[in-house]
Structure formats: C-alpha cells, structure tokens
Image (cartoon, grey):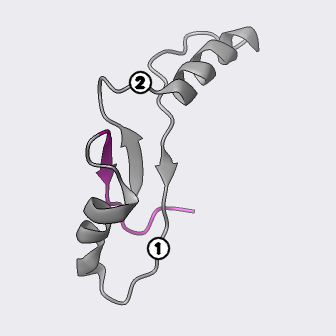
Amino acid sequence: MLIRPKAGILDPQGIAVERALPALGFSGVSHVHVGRLVELELDDPSQLEEMCRTLLANPLIEDYEIVRDLPA
C-alpha cells in the first residue's frame, strides 16, 4: 500500500525535497509529497483494509491506496 499525507496536511519532508532539488540543479519541480510504501504478504488479503485503518495509516492525516502486485 502507498501512504501519503492528506491534501492540506503539512509535509515537512516534501517541502525539504522541493527546496533541495533546485539547489542541486533540478528545475521545474513542485508539489512534492513524501509518503511511504508498506509491502505485506498475507494469507487473507481481506484483512488489508482493516489493517490500514487501524494501524498502518493514520486516517486523520494520511490517505492510503492499496496496490496489489507492484511492478519490480
């Protein structure tokens, strides 16, 4: 699953990356958001939604997206 800050939530890591990239010579970068990827192998994938809501993502400040079989 992919977990990202909700729209309107302060993203200090995203801000730091957005400021650093032009200083390193990369132009045209904006709206940077830093999230995280959680990879799981499950015997019962029907539990994944509940896992996200109760532990893996903070529903107050984060959105999550369940992605099955990410390409390598």
Most extreme residue toward the bottom is 43
Q: Main secondary structure of the magenta part?
A: loop
On-image quarter of the N terminus: bottom left
Q: Position of residue 9 (x, y in %)?
A: 35, 27
Residue at position x 28%, y 64% from top?
Answer: 54
Q: Is residue 14 above or below residue 22?
A: below
User: What is the secondary structure assignment of the residue under circle 2?
Assistant: loop
User: Could you say which disc has been placed on residue 12 in the image?
Assistant: none
Circle 1 crowding by C-alpha within 10 Å: few under 14, some 14–19, many from 20: few
Which of the two discs, 2 and 1, sits closer to the camera? 2
| Rendered location of residue 45, percent (x, y) | 30, 80
Residue 65 screen position, x and y as percent: 31, 53
Start and end of the magenta stretch? 61-72
Q: Amino acid at mark 2?
A: Leu
**What kind of residue is marked 1?**
Leu
For residue 40, which numbered disc appears in the image? 1
The residue wearing badge 2 is 10
CB atoms of marks 2 and 1 within 8 Å: no
Q: Is residue 34 or residue 51 the one in the foreground?
A: 51
State the separation of the CA atoms marked 2 and 1: 27 Å
Percent x, y for residue 27?
62, 10
Q: Is residue 9 left or right of residue 31?
A: left
Which structural element holds mark 1? Answer: loop
Q: Is residue 51 above or below residue 5?
A: below
Residue appearing at x 40%, y 49% in the figure: 3
The answer to whether 48 appears left or right of 24 in the picture is left
Q: Is residue 33 left or right of residue 52?
A: right
